[in-house]
Amino acid sequence: MLQNDAVRNLQYDSEIRVAQQSDPVEPRVFNGPISITSQPRPTREAPRIPLPISTVGGTRTLIPLSGYDCLADLPSVHIEQTFELNESLTAVSSENRYVVRSPLGDAIFAASESSTENSRLIWGSGRPFQMHLLDKTHQEALVFRKKLALGVVCCKPKNLEIWIPPGNLLGRVVESPTFMQPEFFIEDGNTNEPIFCVVGPSNSGCCCFCLPKESYFKIHSGGDLRASIDHKWLASKSQYTTNIYFSDMKLTSKERALILGAAFLLEYMFFQKRF
């Protein structure tokens, strides 16, 4: 299934639109010559474009203060990859594009990978990259950064950092040194303490390299199931999707954003097989 480049053109969904700007100010016109004694300065800093009020899902009216606040109260989040014609005709994959949707199908984020052609050719799905997530106002809400790491057997474990503008570390997802079952820890960016543990299926084979296409991951904390991630075939769109289901509706927007980052790391590690 072929789709247009949703992220480059910022037209990936009919719900994506730019917030209306304030009315323009009439320019001042002078009748005679004047002397400029100082440079004009803005009267105030330009505020961030406000996000539309989220009424798609959830149980309360929410005015988002940051981009990832759109995740609040959602029972689930679905990640769909968009495909391009040149990727299906060439041997090297292009930079991946995704749309993050709510349970009703409304677009929440447009995700755009940034990586080099050499990295994609040499390292394939294990390549280093940055993933930029734009919200409904076309502003950057989250940035996922993955460095080159071959895994716990060969070198440092694979991990993904979750950042928010203008450059604050929200947290990270770190691979655990296990061999028979995938396991990851979601850490807080301020304290570096683990918040959640992500556990994959036990029938993954030696070194966790043989996950089936349809897999299920549990996210728990303190022995309680907080969320889950699965990768399964979506018949209505004829493609595989990565889905996050929030079992604990008391999860904060920050915790949901960290779980979203974990879902993207799992997508690249286990389900992106194309070089």
Image: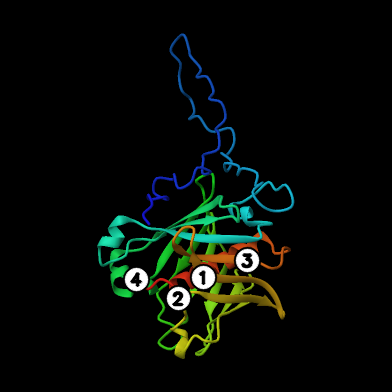
User: Residue tagged by mark 3?
Assistant: 245
Q: What residue sits 39% from the left and 70% below the top?
A: 128
Q: How is the image coloured?
A: rainbow
User: Residue tagged by mark 1?
Assistant: 231
Is the residue 125 above or below the residue 134 in the image? below
The percent position of residue 183, horizontal first and vertical second, equals: 55, 82
Dot in front, 2 or 1:
1
Q: CA distance from mark 4 to mark 3?
A: 27 Å
Asked if residue 196 shows in the view, the reply is no
User: Residue tagged by mark 2?
Assistant: 270
Q: CA distance from mark 2 to mark 3?
A: 19 Å
Query: In the picture provided, is 75 more to the left or to the right than 181?
Result: right
Q: Earlier in the sequence, mark 4 or mark 3?
A: 3
The percent position of residue 15, horizontal first and vertical second, equals: 53, 43
Q: How many residues crowd around disc 3 within 10 Å: few (fewer than 14), some, or many (20 or more)?
A: many
Q: What residue sits 69% from the left and 57% below the top?
A: 73
Q: Earlier in the sequence, mark 2 or mark 1?
A: 1
The amino acid pointed to by label 3 is Tyr
Q: What residue sits 44% from the left and 71% below the top?
A: 268
Q: How many residues crowd around disc 1 within 10 Å: few (fewer than 14), some, or many (20 or more)?
A: many
**Residue farthest toward the left in the current orientation of the protein:** 90
Q: CA distance from mark 4 to mark 2?
A: 11 Å
The percent position of residue 7, horizontal first and vertical second, equals: 42, 50
Please give the label number shown on residue 69.
none
Answer whether labels 4 and 3 touch (C-beta < 8 Å): no
Answer whether labels 2 and 1 touch (C-beta < 8 Å): yes
